[in-house]
Structure formats: C-alpha cells, structure tokens
Image (cartoon, rainbow, N blue to C red):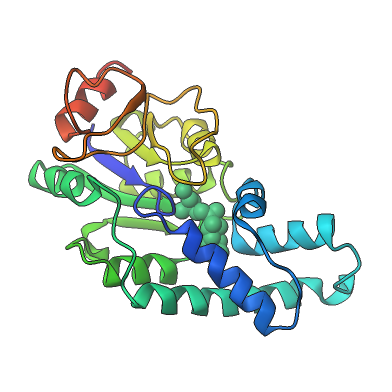
Amino acid sequence: MEALIWDVDGTMAETEEVHREAFNHTFKEHGFEWEWSRSKYQDLLRVTGGVERITHFVRTERPGELPEDTMAATVKELHMAKTEHYVAAMERGDVPLRPGVERLMIEARDAGVRLAIATTTSAPNVEALLRSSPDSVRMDWFEVIGAGGVVPNKKPAPDIYDWTLTRLALPPQRCLALEDSRNGLDSATAAGIPTVVTTSSFTRKQDFAGALAVADSLGEVDAPMRMAVGDARGKPCISLALLRAWHATV
Ligand code: XBP
Ligand code: MG
C-alpha cells in the first residue's frame, strides 16, 4: 500500500450541509423559489457534480422552467455563484476535518505513504476547506489533486480515480481509497482500488457492498469508531497499520 487516495465531501469533512446551504442561497438570490431540504438534497446527492445536480433537478422537478437553449449557460452561472457562496462559507472556518482524518494523514506522511485526492467537487472548494480548517492539513500534502471538471465523467464513473492513478504512476492495487458514498465506492472500485468507507450524515443509510471495510468514522482514541463491515482487531480507530492489514487481504 503506497498511497492513500482521499475523497473530499463527506469523507474529509461534513461539507455537504454547507454545499446545500450554498445552493439554496444562490437559488434565492437569483429569484428561483427552489429550496432543497435535507431530505431532498439526500436524494439529489445521487447525482454527483453541482452542475449535473441542478440540471437533473430542473429537468425532473421543474420541467420547462429554464428555456432549453440557455439552460446550460444559466446552470453554469448558478453553479459559479454557488461555488462563491461555498468558498465564503468555508472561509468562516467553522468546518473541521472529520475525526481521525488529520491523524491518519500525518501517520501516512510519517511512514512515506503518498497522499492524493480524487473528488467530484472543484479545486477552489478543496482549497477553501483545507486553507480554513483548524487542522494542519494543507493542499501541498497531496501529491496529486484530481478535482471536478478535469475528467468528463464524474463519479460513479472511474474517471477521476483513473486520472489520479495515472499521475501517481501507481497500479490501483498499490493504493487504497477513502470514500463516504455509494457513488464514490463504485468509482474507486471501477478503477480497481480497494476502498474503505466512512459513512457521512447524508450517506449513512446507503449500501456499501464491495467495500474493504465500513465504519462510521476513522475514529480517535477518545472517540472510537463503530465498524459496520470489517474486523477492527479491537482497535478504537482506523490507523495506518489497520489499513495495511486490511489492504494485505486484497
Ligand atoms: C461530492 C459531490 C459534489 C458536491 C458539491 O463530491 O458530488 O458535487 O456535492 O460540489 P465528492 P460541487 O464526494 O466526490 O468529494 O457543487 O462543486 O460539485
Ligand atoms: Mg464524498
């Protein structure tokens, strides 16, 4: 196991609530009466990518509300505004990394295990999260950052993981992916990467068949994780050693 490839939203931090608020702020600001509740957003998260999500919502729930010939441009404009609201919210710095994320990243760095990112969200959003989080993790800890539009097909397609593997110059079986959602698990698995899932507030009830292990977080000694699938060997949190042990079974 030579590299850990991290998903961002839901895995590194509970960011989806901030995304949801940014979408709603943008719709209101642009005069649309669209309001995504938590349960509506949970459904809409089946569609990855903010542009794709807005487009899916308009086509399925507000048919005809945007003229077909200008829909792409309008959605792109809405999404750019939403990203500005998201970055501004992040810069208020009140979104910490999830339990165990900083700890595991430091363990990996100390052991010479390479770090990379493979996310559907856009690079400015990743930068805003890492720059403003109270933790010490920074963008330059990641050798490769695969974000958003660098690939044509978003998760669950494997494109973003393939893109990241190419730039790591590693075969998938030498890596391990950390994800929070079914779409993310499918994407990493389709790229051939063994994947550990830490469920997040919007993905808790999803099915994660095919994951190497499933837990409710990476855990901390004082905040032990709860395993749903996999043997934690009596450990309170998911350490690099435990990941190596699971990875060795692949
Ligand atoms: C999660 C996503 C993203 C975010 C919103 O990405 O699917 O679309 O919900 O961010 P991941 P954008 O779990 O792969 O990090 O609006 O920038 O897409
Ligand atoms: Mg995610």
Task: Name the spot of residue 218 as percent of width and height, x first.
Answer: 27, 38
Residue displayed at 21% across by 46% down? 114
Residue displayed at 75% across by 59% down? 57
Seen from the viewer's position, the closer of residues 68 and 161 is 68
Residue 177 vs residue 208: left or right?
Answer: left
Q: Quadrant of residue 219?
A: top left
Task: Name the spot of residue 181 as percent of width and height, x first.
Answer: 50, 40
Residue displayed at 52% across by 32% down? 190
Residue displayed at 84% across by 63% down? 62
Residue 58 shows in this picture: yes
Q: Quadrant of residue 220?
A: top left
Q: Residue furthest right?
A: 64
Total marks shown come to: 0
Residue 149 shows in this picture: no
Residue 198 vs residue 237: left or right?
Answer: right
Q: In which quadrant is the N terminus drawn?
A: top left
Q: Is residue 68 above or below residue 192?
A: below
Task: Name the spot of residue 61 as percent of width and height, x first.
Answer: 82, 57
Seen from the viewer's position, the closer of residues 226 and 44 is 226
Task: Name the spot of residue 13 as percent of width and height, x first.
Answer: 36, 54
Residue 80 vs residue 93: left or right?
Answer: right
Q: In which quadrant is the C terminus drawn?
A: top left
